[in-house]
């Protein structure tokens, strides 16, 4: 089996391209680190685009009357916000950027197993993104990011097929990335890097990759069937022509609930590394944290029915899905408990990445606890399709995943770029994001519990106070997200040069220069100690 690692001759070719064509060589690179940076740039663009849609939605909701946009435009805004943020930011953000950059170094490999497939996955992502942007430019889509039929398959007059194609194509990028990670982790570990010494960041991505490989084909087929019904009027989901709309929900949520863990598991992996480093302690219960990642991946495929309590499914089926939904909370609770136990009596340093980790743990815990209300049959019926669901989802995804992403970006930024960022502005941005997030989304719990439905652009006046608070909070949150963009770009040109290991962290990625060389290590590394050995001064890692 060929691992497709570049030969010295291909290195000469790469250097020649760099000299002759400059930035154009990036478009043909097979270096996992460069591909990660390409992903970072493109994903940042989609995050900005999705954030613009979100701000327009919040401006509309500042007043009860639909006075900024008409209902059709509003439907398109929240739909495009959901599609962009979920399929083009949340799902690929950490795996495609930090995972791509770090996993080979963390296990002592020179590159991913299939470098050309890695580059292909980025091109597929870009093609899907261009289709999505084109859909927006030509008028957008108004079905909601869930594409529920029969509205999406028959009655919507917007560009549903184009949006579906964008989602369908992006799925192949996710599948190829997951395949690459699994093969790399199995086949390319350095001597001494046994599975019980793998960084927990790698364990999290291993579990994520399993979900990507097993779940993404299901949603791809589902979206393809939706397109076929819309184009050829085949009776698949539309009951008017012999279809079953509930079938779509079963297929869609069979993927889309595990997709929540595609988004959040990598963020948990980031927090594992940050908490251990800035507490100067081994992670408490390493086997349980690693096992909980696999447990989440497995149980995540068994809980999709809690999205369908009000669809008329059997009460007994709903009870089973409710029980399983409670069970999947256990592995997540294990992680929160172990992070807390790791910090207990640790020598905690309040650097920027650690502040983001604190924010992640607090917001994810709130998101997880409020998920129990939605997993419980009686309360779910009342809260379905209200702003309580919106708040819960964002506490998990934005409060969890995005804070994990920002924490990881700040943690490994010196390694990626070779430059340090201004610590004051990093800490300030972490504080602003945390405060702004809570002001944005906590009032939505109250509005949803009081009965405000989601996806309405005009609402009863008694809900206005909650929406004004959310809109004001979104402005603060926007500032918090903008600050890192400014000072991280500034650091590329004016930041102090970073040493190989500015945080005193453990792991193979910190044993190479900042930024790393093309092959990551000048000589092959050997791992000869347990993972996260913060008890002594010796790193236990020997190169050569």
Image: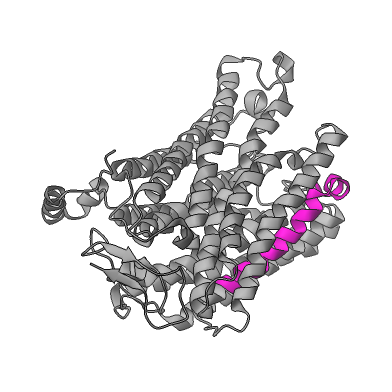
Is 234 colored magenta in this rendering?
Answer: no
Q: Position of residue 428 (x, y in %)?
A: 53, 79
Which one is in front, 74 or 321? 321
Residue 372 part of the magenta segment = yes
Q: Quadrant of the C terminus?
A: bottom left
Where residue 62 appears, as percent x and y from the top left, is 71, 60
Residue 417: which quarter of the image? bottom left
Residue at the (56%, 65%) spot, across then down: 286
518 w.r.t. 3: above or below: below
Q: Horizontally, is 146 left or right of 324 in the view?
A: left
The residue sitting at 46% across, 42% down in the picture is: 174
Q: Position of residue 290 (x, y in %)?
A: 56, 58
Left or right? Give the position of 172 relative to 244. Answer: left
Residue sitting at x 13%, y 51%: 8
Residue 483 or residue 244, whichever sits in front: 244
Question: Which residue corresponds to the image point at 70% horizontal and 18% vertical from the top-left?
Answer: 243
Stretch of the chain drawn in magenta = 357-384
Q: Is residue 304 visible?
A: yes
Please provide percent x and percent y for residue 341: 64, 74
- Quick check: 35 above or below 402? above
Type of secondary structure dominating the magenta stretch? helix
Residue 471 visible within the image: no
Position of residue 254 in the picture relative to residue 357 (left or right): right
């Amino acid at each position: 089996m060929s691992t497709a690692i570049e030969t010295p001759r291909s290195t000469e070719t790469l250097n020649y391209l760099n000299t002759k064509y400059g930035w154009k060589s990036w478009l043909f690179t097979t270096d996992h680190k460069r591909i990660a940076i390409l992903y970072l740039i493109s994903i940042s663009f989609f995050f900005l685009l999705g954030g613009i849609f979100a701000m327009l939605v919040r401006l509309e909701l500042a007043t009860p009357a639909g006075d900024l946009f008409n209902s059709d435009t509003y439907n398109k805004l929240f739909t495009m916000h959901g599609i962009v943020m979920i399929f083009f930011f949340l799902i690929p953000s950490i795996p495609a950027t930090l995972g791509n950059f770090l996993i080979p170094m963390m296990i002592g490999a020179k590159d991913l197993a299939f470098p050309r497939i890695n580059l292909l996955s980025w091109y597929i992502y870009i093609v899907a993104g261009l289709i999505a942007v084109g859909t927006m430019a030509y008028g957008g889509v108004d079905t909601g990011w869930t594409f529920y039929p029969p509205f999406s398959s028959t009655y919507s007059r917007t560009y549903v097929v184009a949006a579906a194609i964008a989602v369908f194509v992006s799925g192949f990028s996710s599948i190829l990335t997951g395949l690459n990670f699994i093969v790399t982790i199995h086949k390319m570990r350095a001597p001494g890097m046994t599975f019980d010494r793998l960084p927990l960041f790698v364990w999290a991505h291993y579990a994520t990759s399993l979900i990507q490989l097993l779940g993404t084909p299901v949603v791809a087929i589902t979206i393809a069937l939706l397109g076929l019904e819309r184009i050829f009027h085949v009776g698949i989901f539309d009951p008017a022509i012999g279809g079953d709309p509930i079938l779509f929900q079963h297929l869609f949520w069979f993927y889309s609930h595990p997709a929540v863990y595609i988004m959040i598991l990598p963020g948990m992996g980031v927090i594992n590394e940050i908490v251990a480093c800035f507490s100067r302690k081994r992670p408490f219960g390493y086997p349980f944290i690693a096992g909980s990642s696999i447990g989440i991946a497995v149980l995540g495929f068994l809980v999709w029915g809690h999205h369908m309590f009000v669809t008329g499914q059997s009460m007994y089926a709903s009870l089973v899905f409710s029980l399983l939904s409670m069970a999947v909370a256990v592995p997540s609770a294990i992680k929160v408990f172990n992070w807390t136990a790791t910090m207990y009596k640790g020598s905690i340093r309040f650097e920027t990445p650690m502040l983001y980790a604190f924010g992640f743990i607090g917001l994810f815990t709130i998101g997880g606890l409020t998920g129990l209300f939605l997993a419980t049959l009686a309360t779910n019926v009342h809260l379905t399709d209200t702003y309580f669901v919106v708040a819960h989802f964002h506490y998990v995804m934005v409060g969890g995943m995005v804070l994990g992403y920002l924490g990881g970006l700040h943690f490994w930024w010196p390694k990626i770029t070779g430059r340090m960022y201004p610590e004051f502005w990093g800490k300030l941005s972490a504080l602003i994001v945390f405060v702004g997030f809570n002001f944005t989304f906590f009032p939505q719990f109250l509005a949803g519990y009081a009965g405000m439905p989601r996806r309405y652009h005009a609402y009863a006046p008694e809900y206005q106070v909650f929406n004004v608070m959310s809109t004001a909070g979104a402005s603060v949150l926007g500032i918090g997200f903008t600050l890192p963009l400014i000072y991280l770009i500034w650091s590329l040109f004016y930041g102090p040069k970073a040493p190989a290991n500015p945080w005193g962290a453990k792991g193979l990625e910190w044993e190479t220069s900042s930024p790393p060389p093309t092959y990551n290590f000048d000589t092959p590394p050997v791992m000869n100690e347990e993972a996260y050995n913060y008890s002594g001064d010796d790193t236990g890692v020997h190169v050569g």
